[in-house]
Image (cartoon, rainbow, N blue to C red):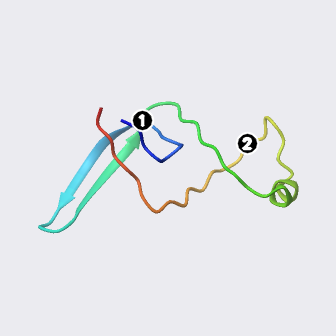
Amino acid sequence: MKYGARNNVTARVTSIKSDPVMSLVKFKVVGPAKMASVLTTESLQELDLKVGDTVQLVIKAINVLPVRE
């Protein structure tokens, strides 16, 4: 099955809370994860990023899609 999302991480379900309409599922990342970011060259220069730098990734996403294969 193909998905539109480029980045993905493997996670384990840690808790589930449900009501008749919605459910909240929490996950714990269980393996190494790789992420990618597309940003303007101006932003890259302002951040002064170089290969090997350690950074914090702040994820801003509309959806987190749990997938079982």
Tell me what residue is drawn at x 71 percent, y 47 percent.
55
**Residue visible at 21% across and 65% down?**
22
SS at circle 1: loop
- Where residue 48 appears, as percent x and y from the top left, is 87, 51
In the rendered view, does 66 fall on the left or right side of 15?
right
Measured as percent of width and height from the top left, residue 6 is found at 53, 43
Amino acid at pointer 2: Thr
Residue at x 29%, y 37% (from the top left corner): 68
Horizontal relation, residue 60 to residue 38: left or right: left
Residue labelled with disc 1: 10
Residue type, numbered disc 1: Thr
Residue 35 vs 24, above or below: the answer is: above
- Quarter where residue 67 is shown: top left
Q: Position of residue 45 (x, y in %)?
A: 88, 55
- In screen coordinates, is 4 left or right of 19? right
Identify residue for label 2: 54
Mark 2 vs mark 1: give the one in front.
1
Looking at the rendered image, the quarter that the N terminus falls into is top left
On screen, residue 62 above or below 53: below
N-term mark: 2 or 1: 1
Task: Identify the secondary structure beneath mark 2.
Answer: loop
Specify few, some or many for label 2: CA neighbours under 10 Å numbering under 14, 14-19, or 20 or more: few
> Closer to the camera, 28 or 40?
40
Cα separation between marks 2 and 1: 22 Å
Contact, CB < 8 Å: mark 2 with mark 1? no
